[in-house]
Image (cartoon, rainbow, N blue to C red):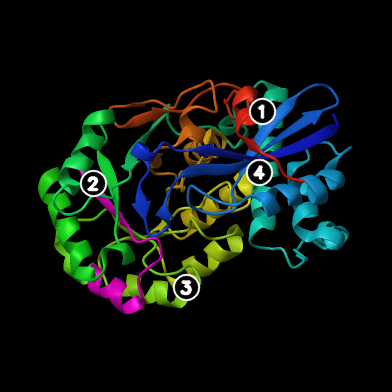
Amino acid sequence: MKIKSITAHWVRVPIPEAQQHVSDFGRVSSFDATILRIETACGLVGYGEAKEEVGSSGNNHGLTAIIRHKFAPMLIGEDPRDINRLWEVMYNGVRDHYALRDAHVFPILGRRGITVSAISGIDMALWDILGKSLGAPVWRLLGGRKASSMPAYASGGWADAANIGKQLMGYVERGGFKAVKMRVGVIDGPVRNSVARVKAAREALGPDIGLMCDAHGTYTVADAKRFCQLVEDFDLTWFEEPVTGDDHRGLAEVRASTTVPIAVGESEFTRHDFLDIAQRGGADFFQPDLAICGGISEAMRIGAIASAYNLRLAPHLWTGALAFAAGLHVSAASPAGWILEYSLGANPLLHEMALEKFTVKDGRIEIPDRPGLGVTIDEGFVQRHAVATP
């Protein structure tokens, strides 16, 4: 089996104005991703998804070009089933022969950023091909699933203090969710304003619905510690991305100051970033984004670190259908896998790009047993929303 072709398209789907939300990322008017397709000489096709930015919108010119012009020529003619070897080839570049021979990495400059995002999408598609070639779902290839379904939490929560309770209760009623997440941080102004919104949310939800808060890395260490101090009585499941991903020391300082569990990882690249966080004692939950962190292969290594440090894995799934499915498979197979994020923002790449639907029932999502990622991509959808790129 050999790789015949690799194509990549920047897919940009406009979000109707009535469904747009505003956060510290600004007004979100589109959902963007790079969708890639790998075809083998024997006709098998695998799909992957890569992201240029962790949020919904992004300019994917550079990411798409890296896949088309750097990695595609490198991989044509290779056996797509050699996933571990091909990951090392992409990550180590011209020094890949040293890495493969000496059993340690020799990465070139692009060991983070959109280079690793590109590797993520390719890795995802290779696992899709491997599963299809064997007639097995990816979770089976990763060692099997722990259960036929997993719990999910509703992710959204932008309303003000007067309306946040109603908004979050609407999520609970929509899918029977037992946990919900809201946004806090710099967009609220002073910390006390975010605290007021959290207080209103907890009062509306009552004691039995889990409540997560996400600051998108916008607080200083001092403000994050102050926030934690003021919300400790509201029984948060976790406080997510309290400070910038550049400050692992500050992250650990925040965690050491509070009993509120800390979640982090959507902006991190590869196992090396996550290992540093674990060693510093910076998190209770790891949240790798499989369209950014290095794909399925690297997410399983990150899950192993989480398990070794007795942490939990809850992937960042503010993504399209492919990365969502990849995160689902990894969560189901990882001993540390705990809960799935389910976007309640407008997300056409999740709900319209694939023929299959990810349905939440009684707060849980079924782990599919279809071959590969278990996702059938609507090629017409991809072509309709593809942005012309060189």
> Tag 1: residue type?
Gly
The span from disc 4 to disc 3 (Cα, nearest Å) is 26 Å
Mark 4 burial class by Cα count in 10 Å: few <14, some 14-19, many 20+? many
Is 225 magenta? The answer is yes
Query: Which residue in the structure is indicated by mark 2?
Result: 210
Query: Which residue in the structure is indicated by mark 3?
Result: 248
Screen quadrant of the N terminus: top right
Point 63% across, 33% down: residue:
141
Point 15% across, 44% down: residue:
205
Query: Which residue in the structure is indicated by mark 4?
Result: 121
From this view, report whether residue 269 is shown above or below residue 317: below
> Tag 2: residue type?
Gly
Image quadrant assignment for residue 155: top left
The span from disc 1 to disc 4 (Cα, nearest Å) is 16 Å
- Residue 121 image offset from top left, x and y in percent: 66, 43
The magenta-colored residue range is: 206-227
> Would you say residue 343 is visible in this rendering?
no
> Tag 3: residue type?
His
Query: Which residue in the structure is indicated by mark 1?
Result: 131
Disc 4 versus disc 2: nearer the observer: 4
